[in-house]
Image: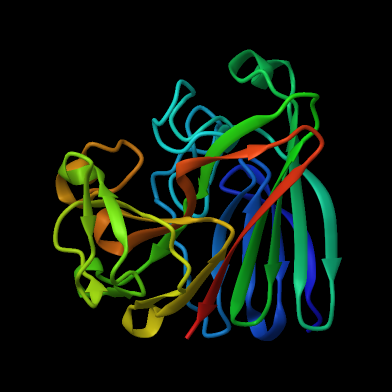
Amino acid sequence: MKPSIETIRFRDTDALRLNGPRGASAVISLLGGQVLSWITPDGRERLFLSDQAVFDGSVAIRGGIPVCWPQFAALGDLPKHGFVRTRPWQVATERCGDDYALVTLAIEDDEATRALWPHAFRLELTLMLEDDRIDLELSVSNTGEAPFSFTGALHTYLRVTQVEDVALEGLYGHHYRDAANGDKVIRDSGTAVMVDAEIDRVYRDVKRPQLLQAGNLSLGIQSQDFPDVVVWNPWVDKCGALADMPADGWRHMLCVEAAVAETPVLVPAGEEWYGRQTLVAV
């Protein structure tokens, strides 16, 4: 069947389903501009979405690919990971070709955002679905008359069968800030990142792609113009403290995020910034 896009309700929230080549599909929510599902032609779900995720806008949806902006984590005065994750977005573009489906969602400043962060902006997230890959592009436009700076991330939750069995390649030799170890800066000297405890790392200035070796759920991961890569898993105790995660949720996810975390990006008045993350089934 030819690729198509349909409006749906997904867990009681408005969303779009992209139907791609060979049975591939993706779902993106208008709440938060958040990708919630990506199923490849083999029928496998590639993103982790918590069974206990909240969809009423009171908190961010736990899982999928949240958009963290204009602040990453608690590195500033705004709510953790910014404010666009819990706000409504609008459909800006829908387009299909013979081998892809594409949607762009957008959000602009309003009175509520300016009360938190006094800047004029337009944010666009473009999702393109092909048969074995998705491309996500985040566009940040400064529509005001003064420069602003931001940090942020595409906070991608990848689904795995058992996180203890996966290996993330491509980060050897990079320095990372280890939030699970007192924010120490450490040089990664292993051939692959393995998860056997809580992991919360910001890898700096990463230019190589990563490969998540995860059996039948292996993925290639590539980012452009996002300088940092965040790797996160809360492990047992911190997962248990999250009201919107099942007790064993930590075992089935690993976040590999395209991020601007260490050094804010400055966007002059009237200018734009773009960043991209690509996920490919391998």
Whether residue 234 is visible, yes or no, is yes
User: Residue 121 occupies which quadrant of the picture?
Assistant: top right
Whether residue 61 is visible, yes or no, is no
- Residue 127, horizontal then vertical, whole percent: 69, 61
Residue 211 located left or right of residue 168: right
Residue in view at x 39 percent, y 55 percent:
204
Residue 196 located left or right of residue 65: left
| In the rendered image, the vertical position of residue 211 relative to residue 253, given as above or below | below
User: Residue 7 occupies which quadrant of the picture?
Assistant: bottom right
| In the rendered image, the vertical position of residue 140 relative to residue 102, given as above or below | above
Residue 94 located left or right of residue 201: right
- In the image, 248 versus 109, the foreground residue is 109
Residue in view at x 52 percent, y 53 percent:
65
- Residue 26, horizontal then vertical, whole percent: 63, 65
Quarter of the image with the N terminus is bottom right
- In the image, 259 versus 281, the foreground residue is 259
| In the rendered image, the vertical position of residue 78 relative to residue 257, given as above or below | above
- Residue 192, horizontal then vertical, whole percent: 25, 75
